[in-house]
């Protein structure tokens, strides 16, 4: 007998990050924090080792009238700075984080048993969401040399099209988690042209997960590729999954949005009606204080917020420049990094398992991902990053002897 319906996978989540966070904490207690390299934590930390929490954000939140914090939300009023002249129809649904936006898209756009297309190296929640909605996944290889693997992306889409009447795919860009890759405008153009082709026979939903976009090194140009979405055909919809978790350093406020884009008002309306009902039936409405903070900042404190954020973007760049330069000098292989919270070392899963364990013996704590090891430069101070790549390389070399 079971309390849970038969179709649900009951295997507990294996939380690989939590176990390592705990191991790193114990090591710091035993050996002293200065003797441990903790490359695990996936949130932005200051050089002093504290979780970064923007003053502009939390002073705004705390200055809100109690009634704002107490009341139900009316709607998501913030403007995620879209291209104003996009010739697309658009609707915004508030969600609890980017998680809510991605989750409700895959829940509503695929039938049970159909296949969701995801990147081969990716944020773990995509497969978990697919599992919970009885969906299969098929992964596209991310890279061919130092660029996006267009050939494999197309091949995977084509093979899924042979099995089902619709395509739903996730592209986590820019600042991909966990590789730090960002696609070029030309790569985006080719993806859209290809999806338009696919849409002649299949409906296509592109989920663009932009969780880390506000930490791009390209500043406002990071959003330039949105213009490629202007070219979508009628049978293509784009759901942009936006999150304030990283953008406002407010992971715990649980706020984000699904931005629905389509060529016709009918396409967008169809998505909106169903997403709205899903929201209502799942989480009802979204943290009003978080939404209010977001809109207050966008309306009244944008410059102050952008200046504060820029300091961290610059810091992240300094950290990644240092790590990448030293990795390249040491010959430590990594996936093509451009920007973002993580760098991922490239290797097969056998080597990954051995290296990950061996690194812990040297008090270097990292996270295993498919085909690699994730280095969280977002949480490591420069002094911890300095020399880390060389140390990792020498542990790696000692394994192959
Ligand atoms: N997408 C990616 C790639 C992420 O790494 C995360 C968080 O780690 C999210 C989306 C969603 O985060 P949240 O639900 O906190 O907005």
Image (spheres, rainbow, N blue to C red):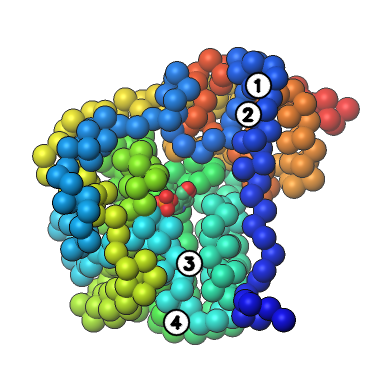
| Of pointers 3 and 1, the one earlier in the residue sequence | 1
Q: Residue at x 23, y 40 (%)?
A: 61
Characterize the local packing of mark 3: few (<14), some (14-19) or many (20 or more) Cα atoms within 10 angstroms.
many
Q: Residue at x 69, y 64 (%)?
A: 11
In the image shown, does 2 or 322 lie closer to the viewer?
2
Please tell me whether residue 191 is drawn above or below residue 22 in the rendered image.
below
Q: Quadrant location of residue 59?
A: top left
Q: Which mark is residue 29?
A: 1
- Closer to the observer: label 4 or label 3? 3
Q: Residue 213, can we see it?
A: no
- The residue that disc 4 covers is 202
In the image shown, does 166 or 188 lie closer to the viewer?
166
Please tell me whether residue 254 is drawn above or below residue 194 in the rendered image.
above
Rounded to the nearest angstrom, the CA distance separating label 3 from label 1 is 43 Å
- Closer to the observer: label 3 or label 1? 1
The answer to whether the beta carbon of the residue marked 4 is less than 8 Å from any atom of ligand 1 is: no
- The residue that disc 2 covers is 25
| Of pointers 4 and 2, the one earlier in the residue sequence | 2
Q: Quadrant location of residue 251?
A: top left
Relative image position of residue 377 (x, y in whole percent) = 52, 30
Q: Residue 144, can we see it?
A: yes
Rounded to the nearest angstrom, the CA distance separating label 4 from label 1 is 56 Å
Rounded to the nearest angstrom, the CA distance separating label 4 from label 3 is 13 Å
Question: Contact (CB < 8 A) between labels 3 and 1?
Answer: no
- The residue that disc 3 covers is 169
In which quadrant of the rendered image does the N terminus lie? bottom right
Secondary structure state at the residue bearing disc 3: strand
């Amino acid at each position: 007998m079971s309390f849970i319906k038969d179709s649900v996978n009951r295997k507990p989540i294996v939380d690989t990050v939590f176990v390592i966070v705990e191991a790193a904490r114990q090591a710091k207690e035993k050996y002293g924090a200065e003797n441990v390299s903790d490359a695990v934590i996936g949130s932005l930390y200051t050089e002093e080792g504290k979780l970064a929490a923007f003053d502009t954000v939390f002073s705004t939140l705390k200055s809100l009238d109690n009634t704002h914090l107490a009341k139900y939300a009316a709607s998501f009023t913030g403007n995620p700075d879209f291209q104003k002249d996009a010739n697309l129809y658009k609707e915004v649904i508030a969600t609890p984080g980017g998680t809510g936006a991605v989750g409700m898209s895959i829940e509503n756009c695929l039938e049970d048993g159909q296949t969701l297309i995801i990147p081969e190296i990716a944020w773990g929640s995509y497969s978990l969401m697919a599992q919970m909605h009885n969906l299969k996944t098929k992964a596209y290889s991310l890279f061919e040399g130092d660029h996006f693997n267009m050939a494999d992306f197309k091949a995977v889409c084509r093979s899924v099209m042979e099995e089902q009447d619709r395509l739903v795919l996730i592209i986590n860009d820019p600042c991909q988690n966990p590789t730090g890759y960002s696609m070029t405008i030309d790569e985006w153009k080719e993806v859209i042209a290809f999806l338009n082709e696919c849409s002649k026979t299949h409906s296509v939903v592109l989920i663009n997960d932009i969780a880390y976009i506000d930490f791009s090194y390209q500043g406002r140009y990071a959003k330039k590729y949105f213009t490629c979405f202007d070219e979508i055909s009628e049978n293509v919809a784009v759901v942009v999954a936006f999150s304030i978790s990283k953008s406002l350093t407010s992971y715990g406020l649980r706020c984000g949005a699904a931005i629905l884009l389509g060529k016709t008002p009918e396409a967008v309306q169809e998505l909106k009606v169903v997403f709205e009902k899903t929201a209502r039936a799942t989480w009802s409405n979204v943290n009003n204080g978080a939404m209010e903070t977001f809109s207050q900042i966008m309306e009244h404190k944008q410059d102050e917020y952008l200046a504060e954020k820029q300091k961290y973007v610059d810091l992240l760049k300094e950290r990644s420049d240092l790590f990448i330069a030293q990795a390249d000098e040491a010959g430590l292989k990594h996936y093509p990094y451009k920007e973002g919270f993580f760098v991922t070392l490239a290797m097969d899963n056998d080597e990954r398992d051995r290296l990950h364990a061996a690194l812990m013996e040297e008090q270097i704590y990292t996270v295993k991902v498919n085909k690699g090891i994730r280095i969280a430069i977002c949480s490591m101070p420069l002094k911890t990053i300095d020399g880390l790549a060389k140390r990792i390389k020498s542990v790696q070399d000692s394994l192959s002897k």
